[in-house]
Image (cartoon, rainbow, N blue to C red):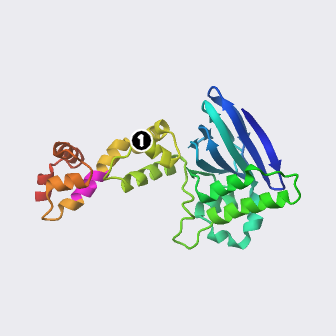
């Protein structure tokens, strides 16, 4: 498998990762300082990790990493075929082009741009990332105007992905920290949104941009509860709200919050509240 510097401009350079890996192992490491990395992971699975953050990349995912402490970051790939583009953008280059509009950036990204704060994010590649990867796929920097074209493609991505359109906008879903605290918060937000339905650990981990094992251990270590225990708490909290209604039937409430068995619901309810649903309702 090849890891090669594809092209380099003043302030922006691109690495291309492509080939077949027959066994897992670390093949790449780099110190990050005064720059941001944009990983566009088209094919293959791997982990990008530093001293505190770990981002698990599956096919069709992207990651944004920024750090100004000079820490060493590693990339560990899993067996299989890999194809990815990694853009490395210097902070001064991006700051000059954003200029006075920096106040419209997401606060997490703005902190990195101004102060060099640590930044780590992963998510599914959607329109902006797919267009960026596709437009750069056949890029040749030797062609007249090629450098301008590459720069325009990177700036187009930044204009769409990094800016908030108003104060309520989170910047097109960007940018939640994927450090230990932020990753746990994201997992719990996803659980809260899906509290009434089943969600598999692998699916939850994919949405959070982490490996299932790493996510489970991190949640348990930081909260003292497993992911399943958090889901149970969220369901019982929702059940308590429904039981406040006088005409609510316990069986219907159990189904509403995701329990198909009344006995399982009653057991979970007692474990969380110390009472049965009927006892809790009666005060």
Q: Circle 1 is placed at which residue position?
A: 201
The main secondary structure of the magenta stretch is helix
User: 85 left or right of 283?
Assistant: right
Q: Is residue 135 magenta?
A: no
Q: Is residue 258 visible?
A: yes
Count neighbours of disc 1 (C-alpha within 10 A) and say few if under 14, some if 14 to 19, many if 20 or more: some
Q: Whole-percent x and y of residue 168? A: 51, 71
Residue under the image location 41 percent in, 41 percent down? 201
User: 278 left or right of 185?
Assistant: left
Q: Read off the magenta span.
A: 234-240
Residue under the image location 27 percent in, 57 percent down? 238
In the foreground, 54 or 154: 154
Q: Whole-percent x and y of residue 178? A: 55, 49
Residue under the image location 72 percent in, 63 percent down? 155
Q: To which quarter of the image does residue 146 belong?
A: bottom right
Residue at far top of view:
23
Q: Is residue 283 visible?
A: no
Residue under the image location 75 percent in, 44 percent down? 15
Residue 45 vertical position relative to residue 87 in the rendered view, above or below: above
User: 14 left or right of 257?
Assistant: right
Residue 177 vertical position relative to residue 202 in the rendered view, above or below: below
Q: Is residue 238 magenta?
A: yes
In the foreground, 66 or 18: 18
Q: To which quarter of the image does residue 54 belong?
A: top right
Q: What is the secondary structure assignment of the residue under circle 1? A: helix
Q: Whole-percent x and y of residue 109? A: 63, 60
User: 255 left or right of 15?
Assistant: left
């Amino acid at each position: 498998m090849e890891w090669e510097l594809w092209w380099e401009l003043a302030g922006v350079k691109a690495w291309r990762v492509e080939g077949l890996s027959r066994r897992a192992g670390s093949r790449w490491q780099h110190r990050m300082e005064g720059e941001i990395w944009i990983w566009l992971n088209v094919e293959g699975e791997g982990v990008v990790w530093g001293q505190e953050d770990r981002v698990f990349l599956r096919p069709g995912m992207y990651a944004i990493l920024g750090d100004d402490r000079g820490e060493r970051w590693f990339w560990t790939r899993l067996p299989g075929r890999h194809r990815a583009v990694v853009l490395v953008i210097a902070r001064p280059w991006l700051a000059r082009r954003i200029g006075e509009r920096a106040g419209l950036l997401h606060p997490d990204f703005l902190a990195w741009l101004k102060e060099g704060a640590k930044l780590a994010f992963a998510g599914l590649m959607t329109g902006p990332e797919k267009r960026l990867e596709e437009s750069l796929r056949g890029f040749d920097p030797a062609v007249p105007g090629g450098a301008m074209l590459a720069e325009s493609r990177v700036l187009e991505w930044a204009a769409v992905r990094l800016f908030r359109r108003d104060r309520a906008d989170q910047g097109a879903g960007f940018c939640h920290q994927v450090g230990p605290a932020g990753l746990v918060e994201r997992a719990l937000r996803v659980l809260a949104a899906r509290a009434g339905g089943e969600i598999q650990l692998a699916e939850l981990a994919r949405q959070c941009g982490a490996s299932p094992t790493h996510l489970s251990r991190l949640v348990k270590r930081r909260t003292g509860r497993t992911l399943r225990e958090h889901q149970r708490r969220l369901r019982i909290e929702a059940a308590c709200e429904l039981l406040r209604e006088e005409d609510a039937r316990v069986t219907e409430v159990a189904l509403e919050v995701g329990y198909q068995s009344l006995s399982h619901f009653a057991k979970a309810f007692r474990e969380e509240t110390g009472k049965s649903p009927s006892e809790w309702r009666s005060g």
